[in-house]
């Protein structure tokens, strides 16, 4: 049987659908009660671990897992429907180095990841929540960043991007406190058309993508990170612009 390629906005979804006898089981139906996950037990091997938070339909995790079979990937999203899509695609591609679970990012990094156990954390297009009354739901806060910093192994990387200039301005203010942060203005070389569904969609509407990579600051202790987090501003910025319409579109379906 011929292997099948899937497309999204005209851009191929990484990998191919394999014959059913080669499918994997990438979904974690129910996470255990809060406590550090045992990556070796989950993946059945000891390997570096990459996390993706708010993974949506999982495009980046699929791509990275296919390109880096020697690395394990754990991705979560708060929305069960998108995790169902991601899991199906992971299964059909036979990806034994991927797991998907439904969980909000904030409590996941806080409660489920042991300190210093992760090689990279990826966060693509966290929801900006344009309405001021929902600003408290914004994921990127100083405390969240302190928790991401805590997850990362020495030299570990936090990769983040958004198409919202107001959120980006806030991120650029707080990220350097926890990470040696560098902005990347060009598309990622491994995914010139976009690493995530939202990036592809936003670029098709002419929006600018703001990207960056931060290396976890070494020598920043947990106590110091928490102390400094308390002194930093919360993400209370006002959000405006054409990207609002795009968010309405996104809510209609993934
Ligand atoms: C704009 S979409 C981006 C999805 C994907 N990362 C991409 O770039 O295509 C935001 C995603 O974050 C998820 N989300 C929102 N709040 C979340 C939270 N607190 N924890 C985890 N995921 C969250 C949503 O369900 C949605 O899938």
Image (tube, rainbow, N blue to C red):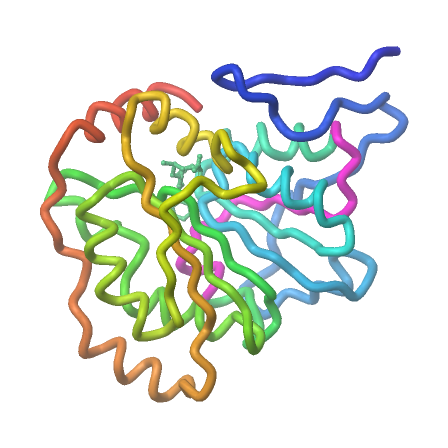
- Rendered residue at 48%/59% (across/down): 108
Residue 214, position as x, y percentages in the image:
42, 65
Residue 163, position as x, y percentages in the image:
29, 39
- Rendered residue at 33%/39% (across/down): 209
* Quarter placement of the N terminus: top right
For this orientation, the residue located farthest to the top is 1
Nearest to the observer: residue 229 or residue 196: 196
Residue 3, position as x, y percentages in the image:
80, 17
Q: Is residue 52 left or right of residue 17?
A: left
Q: Which residues are magenta?
A: 92-109
Q: Is residue 215 left or right of residue 239?
A: right
- Vertical position of residue 71 compared to residue 84: above or below: below
- Rendered residue at 55%/65% (across/down): 112
- Vertical position of residue 181 compared to residue 221: above or below: above
Residue 130, position as x, y percentages in the image:
17, 39
Residue 187 figure quarter = top left
Q: Is residue 229 left or right of residue 44?
A: left
């Amino acid at each position: 049987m011929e292997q099948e390629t899937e497309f999204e906005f005209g851009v191929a979804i990484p990998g191919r659908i394999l014959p059913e006898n080669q499918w994997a089981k990438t979904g974690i139906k129910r996470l255990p009660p809060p406590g550090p996950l045992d990556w070796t037990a989950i993946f059945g091997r000891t390997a570096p671990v990459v996390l993706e938070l708010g993974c949506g339909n999982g495009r980046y995790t699929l791509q990275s897992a296919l390109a880096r079979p020697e690395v394990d990937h754990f991705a979560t999203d708060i929305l069960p429907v998108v995790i169902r899509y991601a899991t199906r695609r992971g299964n059909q591609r036979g990806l034994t180095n991927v797991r998907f679970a439904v969980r909000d990012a904030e409590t996941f990094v806080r409660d489920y990841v042991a300190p210093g156990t992760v090689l990279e954390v990826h966060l693509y297009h966290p929801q900006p929540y344009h309405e001021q009354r929902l600003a408290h739901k914004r994921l990127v806060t100083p405390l969240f960043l302190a928790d991401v910093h805590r997850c990362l192994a020495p030299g570990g990387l936090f990769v983040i991007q958004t198409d919202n200039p107001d959120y980006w301005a806030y991120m650029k203010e707080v990220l350097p406190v926890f990470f040696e942060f560098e902005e990347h203005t060009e598309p990622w070389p491994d995914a010139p058309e976009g690493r995530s569904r939202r990036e592809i969609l936003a670029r098709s509407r002419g929006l600018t993508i703001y990207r960056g990579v931060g290396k976890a600051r070494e020598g920043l202790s947990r106590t110091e990170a928490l102390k400094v987090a308390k002194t930093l501003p919360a993400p209370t910025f006002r959000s405006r612009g054409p990207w609002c319409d795009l968010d309405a579109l996104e809510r209609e379906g993934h």
